[in-house]
Image: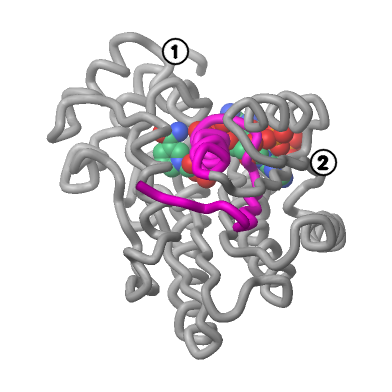
Amino acid sequence: MFDFSNKTVFIAGGTSGINLGIAQAFAEVGARVAVLSRSQEKVDAAVASIAAHGGEVIGFSADVRDYAAVEEALKAAHQQFGDLDVLVSGAAGNFPAKALGMSANAFKSVVDIDLMGTYHVLRAAFPLLKKPGASVINISAPQAFIPMAYQMHVCAAKAGVDMVTRVAALEWGKEGVRVNSVVPGPIEGTEGMARLAPTPDSQSRVADSVPLGRFGTTQDVANCCLWLSSARAYYVMGTVIPVDGGWALGGASELGKTFDALLSARE
Ligand code: COA
Ligand code: NAP
């Protein structure tokens, strides 16, 4: 259905979970894939697993909070694979904590990874993007537009990510670069959900709160990214697209309640 042969895809945070699923999906349809994350071990494992889905793969160990390191990795990927057709910014951090239960540094860590990291990735990648034609996708979260208890840091950071998407779309459209956010719902088997719904009881409450009645899969999110980066979506620009079974329509705002029991047990 999609053909990304001879296309280059760079995925920041592409070594586990949803972003790894996106990387594997692009490799399956012929893309050259580059991934970046902090842990060299995770980078090595991800490169091997993406390569098993086909295509050429390279990986870089870097922290998205470090602009120079991000720029160096992007330039190295560009040198090896050429102009970037698709850029995905998905590195993120999350933990449930009350606003008063986290330090200023804890709040800042998430803002630095999610929001500053996304800015760094887009800022450093822009000169290396294919123009016209590149697709930039920021991986956001329902917290960007749904206030959620125990998630002040993530809500603030991801709201910023979606504004980065919209302003970049305004400024980069003239050069033929499309920028959109993809908003995963609760995705099974991911670190994010392990942190936010760690018990069987909280998991079944989350599944019940999704109109489609189930967790999503990494493939569900990857399918949207493939479409968004394909010729079928050439007029889709500056949007924030939930891939969440309808969770953002109401259920997501209930998530904070599942943290009450969880965190009060720790206090
Ligand atoms: N509750 C409250 N504060 C917490 C916390 C928690 N569960 N976990 C970490 N923190 C605080 C730390 O205490 C520290 O604050 P301090 O310096 O005042 O003590 C601050 O957050 C930074 O923690 P640190 O471990 O030094 O940061 P890091 O840069 O190594 O890691 C995190 C960043 C905290 C976001 C870490 O959870 C991470 O690496 N996450 C990536 C994976 C992930 O979250 N995946 C899901 C994506 S949705
Ligand atoms: P994950 O597996 O923990 O993925 C996070 C990725 O980012 C990892 O590859 C991690 O690798 C990397 N990373 C983290 N901090 C980094 C940093 N400072 N610099 C560089 N790389 C860093 O999490 P996930 O649950 O799949 O989430 C992926 C994305 O989807 C995130 O943007 C998240 O907000 C979003 N999302 C997830 C869900 C869900 O249900 N899971 C729902 C909505 C939105 P290293 O540890 O090696 O750095």
Is residue 73 found left or right of 90 in the rendered image? right
Q: How many marks?
A: 2
Q: Earlier in the sequence, mark 1 or mark 2?
A: 2
Instruction: Depth check: give the residue in front, 98 or 1.
Output: 1
Establish whether ligand 2 lies closer than 8 Å to the Cβ of label 2.
Answer: yes
The residue beneath circle 1 is 265
Rendered residue at 33%/71% (across/down): 236
Q: Is residue 248 magenta?
A: no
Rendered residue at 60%/57% (across/down): 7
Height in image: 132 above or below 241? Answer: below
Most extreme residue toward the left is: 211
Instruction: Depth check: give the residue in front, 250 or 62.
Output: 62
Q: Is residue 11 magenta?
A: yes
Give the magenta range: 1-29
Label 2 sits on a secondary structure element that is strand
Amino acid under disc 1: Ala
